[in-house]
Image: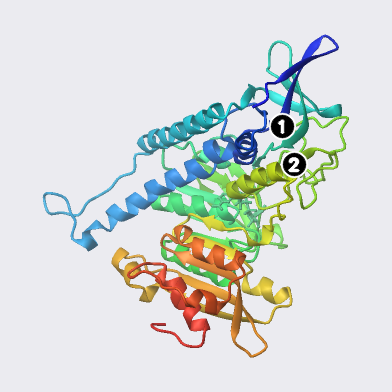
Amino acid sequence: MAQPNVAALGGSSLIQHELVVIGGGPAGYAAALYGAASGLDVALVEEHLLGGTCLHVGCIPAKELLETAAVLRTVRHAADFGVGDVGGGDLEPAVDLAASQTRKQKVIDGLARGVTGLLAGRDVTVYKGTGRLGAAHVVSIDHGAGDPTLVVSEHVVLATGSSPRTIPGFEVDGTLVMTSDEVLSLDEVPERVAVIGGGAIGCEFASMLADYGSTVTLLEAAPEILPGCDADAARAVRRAFRKREIDVHSGVAVADHQPGDAGTTVRFGPAGGNDAEGTDLDVDLVVVAVGRRPRGDSAGLVGTRVAVDDRGFIEVDDRLRTGEPGVYAVGDVVDTPQLAHVGFAEGMFVVRDLLGESPAPLDPGTVPWCIYSHPEVAFAGLTEAAAMEAGHDVVVSSHRFAGNGRAMILGEVDGLVKVVAEKDPDGRAGRILGVHMVGPWVTEQLGQGYLAVNWEATVDDVAAHIQPHPTLSELFGETVLSLTGRSLHG
Ligand code: NAI
């Protein structure tokens, strides 16, 4: 590994690396780790915590707290399995969010130690501070006190991430109005909650809080929750939510909220309607989950040719190159799906690109999506509507978990698997264009569907393979099999 070079620049020393990454979230640390694994002398600049949103206020804490919800559900249904307390009565679970928070933090700390150790193990130089890219690839690192550190590199990767979006009329105060940043630190269960936004974050929180015992109202501006998901998948989640008494209102506009003696009153009405049609909803907590704003402007960029669009995204081409030669951008700060695993893939991609390995550009349309609500949602590839819109003649097949043995054993029979395939000229189902799943552990079952879509497999290719029995994944096999024209159980 090359040793950093130190040169002089107007009195300050200028430390030279072969790759400088600004931002230590999944996209940034992936670029750093993969760059170091490729033999580069890498520096990583992070102003807050290594691991970024995903590890500290995103994927990991959210899924950890959702696991508390899953344990609660299991215990609540224990009597169905003949499991009660020693006195013979039903188990009556109570949620202790403070204890759950302690467990969450333990998981986060363990993973944070892991990232730190991996970076150290690969001799990545980690600078704590705010990195600002200026002219001539010089990155100035502001440590909050003392002189900034100046580093320079032929290649710079911008990975400054995103932060929760807010909406007018709902100032985040951390008590009555929260974004995901604050909800993930809740240590008491609110009685009544309005969740604004029915995307991935909104649905996960609505599901989690309903399991904890909150009365939840979900307010979504679009005509259906989970925009971007296949319509049948979104409908299945909505149906399951209704059964769980989550009150879902879609096609609504949320006006504002009026704090009162106890909690606050949220006013909403039909999108495009007038105030007179509004409904008042009394709640103890408003969760705003209306998307994440890219932090394109947070890495200086003065004197560079890096462009930031009016939504805050750094503009890149399909090789994630910015307008400044040698400078890349990856992760939530570019306009590709804001998912940690997409960040990992982008971080690794740019390393291969700067090394001249000419990797094939990533296709944002076929990445895996996993939403950890109850029921879970997972998909890859085109929805039925998007496939038709793209001009494909399609054949689809859906099968429900209700008939799957393992799902019945688990007592988790809500949900379906839907496969969208291209219709060949002979009318038979050909290439698999999209796989959509709702139900138990589908986030762990998507792998086969993701590979099928991205390997451009046909229905016949996949149907030739055996699914183990009894498994939840048999439903994917059964759905594909039925598209061959002959099915077994379906
Ligand atoms: P999102 O963009 O997925 O969903 C936001 C939702 O809010 C949309 O359905 C939108 O129509 C709705 N909305 C926007 N303004 C509104 C308003 N004023 N009133 C009512 N509804 C409104 O964003 P989300 O859920 O906040 O997630 C942010 C990003 O993080 C997304 O890219 C998401 O995919 C990603 N993410 C993914 C997760 C996963 O895959 N499990 C989990 C968490 C986040």
Q: Find residue 484 and name its label.
A: none
Q: Are marks 1 and 2 in contact (CB under 8 Å)?
A: yes
Quadrant (top left/top right/bottom left/bottom right) for the N terminus: top right
Element type where label 2 sits in the image: helix
Q: Which residue lies furthest to the left in this view?
A: 87
Which callout, 1 or 2, points at the residue further toward the start of the chain? 1
- Distance between the alpha carbons at the discs numbered 1 and 2: 9 Å
Residue 207 point in image, percent of width and height: 46, 54
Residue 452 point in image, percent of width and height: 56, 68
Q: In this view, does 10 lie above or below 369?
A: above
Residue plotted at (31% across, 63% down): 410
Front-most of 404 and 74? 404
- Give the residue type that dot 1 points to: Leu
Q: Residues within 10 Å of mark 2 (few under 14, many from 20)?
A: many
- Give the residue type that dot 2 points to: Leu
Element type where label 1 sits in the image: strand
Residue 17 point in image, percent of width and height: 72, 26
Residue 121 point in image, percent of width and height: 53, 28
Front-most of 274 and 148? 148
Front-most of 462 and 90? 462
Q: Name the residue under label 1.
A: 19
One can see residue 176 in this view:
no
Q: Mark 2 points at which residue?
A: 354
Front-most of 175 and 373? 373
Residue plotted at (48% across, 54% down): 372
Q: Is residue 412 above or below residue 14?
A: below
